[in-house]
Image (cartoon, rainbow, N blue to C red):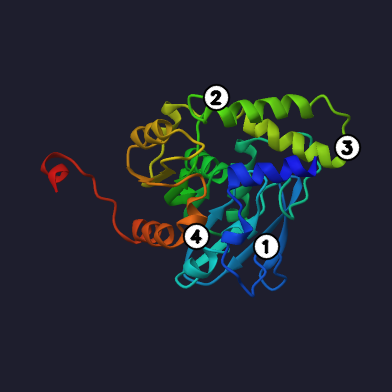
């Protein structure tokens, strides 16, 4: 089952260790930057870096803080960067039997409350993008601006590449037939997310008040038309589709990703209409 768990990260979080930038700092396992917080029934592990305006960065399914070794050095020069291992992932200890995106979004709100952060900019990748959208929907006062890449609203092949969707659904069905073990309990929760969630409506997206940069690769596991639907449904949004790109935009396009997201954060949102569309 460990091999299956690694595949989640490869396909949905885009982990490719050869592509990661070498670093002397052990992001995700750094005693100087890390802390545990008793958060809503589990022990959440988080790390902070830098100083300035707060920036929350959220990882994807089966991932951890380690996934953002390409973003932390860049953004920590000008921001207080906050990263957490979501419940049942990374170093966060979660004994519960269930897991949902809504739970994780509320966990992040709890972390921000714990750190006394009234509002912040947010980056979310894959499942982290889903969590970011839900944070903006459920706790709008906490999100100033939001950048999401590789997020989806529903768990079906209208949103996810049909091959990947069938693969996740089949493995979820297979895992649920196996005898339960502590390790399998965690994998069941994560595969349930891939196969059965989320369920975010267009009406929910229309409630988002903050500006949102919606990102996807043109060969992402999330269909391009679905990424466009997300952008078109948010009142204040920009859309950025990267050419010749899959799901792992923060890794394989790290430099342009970091620069473009930072520009989005620092520049005022501009409503583009009328003659502005010709510029």
Does label 4 or label 2 sit earlier along the sequence?
A: 4
Does label 3 or label 2 sit earlier along the sequence?
A: 2
Marks 1 and 3: in contact by CB < 8 Å?
A: no
Which mark lies nearer to you, 3 or 4? 3
- Name the disc covering residue 55, or none: 4
Q: Secondary structure at mark 3?
A: loop
| Mark pair 2, 1: CA separation | 32 Å
Which mark lies nearer to you, 1 or 4? 1
Q: Would you name the residue on which mark 2 appears?
A: 156
| Mark pair 1, 4: CA separation | 16 Å
- Name the disc covering residue 181, or none: 3
Which mark lies nearer to you, 2 or 1? 2
| Mark pair 3, 2: CA separation | 28 Å
Which mark lies nearer to you, 4 or 2? 2
- Picture coordinates of residue 120 (x, y %)? 47, 56
Residue farthest to the left, as pictured: 275
Does label 3 or label 1 sit earlier along the sequence?
A: 1
Does label 3 or label 4 sit earlier along the sequence?
A: 4
| Mark pair 4, 2: CA separation | 31 Å
Tell which of 277 and 249 is nearer to you: 249
Compared across the picture, whether 103 is left or right of 173 comes to: left
Q: Secondary structure at mark 4?
A: strand
């Amino acid at each position: 089952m460990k091999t299956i768990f690694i595949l989640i990260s490869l396909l949905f979080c885009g982990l490719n260790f050869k592509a990661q930038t070498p670093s002397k700092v052990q992001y995700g396992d750094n005693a100087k930057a890390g802390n545990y917080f008793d958060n809503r029934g589990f022990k959440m592990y988080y790390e902070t870096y830098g100083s300035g305006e707060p920036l929350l960065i959220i990882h994807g399914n089966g991932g951890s803080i380690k996934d953002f070794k390409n973003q932390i050095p860049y953004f920590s020069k000008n921001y207080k960067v906050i990263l957490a291992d979501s419940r049942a992932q990374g170093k966060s200890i979660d004994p519960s039997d269930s897991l949902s995106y809504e739970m994780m979004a509320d966990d992040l709100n709890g972390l921000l409350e714990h750190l006394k952060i009234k509002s912040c900019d947010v980056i979310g990748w894959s499942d982290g993008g889903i969590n970011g959208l839900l944070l903006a929907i459920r706790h709008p006062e906490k999100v100033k601006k939001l950048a999401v890449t590789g997020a989806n609203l529903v768990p079906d092949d209208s949103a996810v590449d049909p091959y990947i969707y069938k693969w996740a659904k089949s493995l979820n069905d297979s895992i649920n037939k196996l005898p339960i073990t502590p390790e399998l309990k965690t994998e069941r929760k994560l595969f349930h997310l891939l196969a059965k969630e989320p369920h975010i409506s267009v009406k929910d997206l229309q409630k988002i008040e903050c500006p949102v940069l919606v990102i996807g690769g043109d060969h992402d596991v999330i269909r391009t038309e679905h990424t466009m639907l997300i952008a078109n449904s948010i009142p204040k949004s920009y859309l950025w589709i990267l050419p010749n790109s899959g799901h792992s935009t923060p890794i394989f396009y790290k430099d342009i990703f970091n620069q473009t997201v930072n520009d989005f954060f620092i520049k005022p949102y501009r409503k583009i209409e009328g003659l502005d569309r010709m510029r």
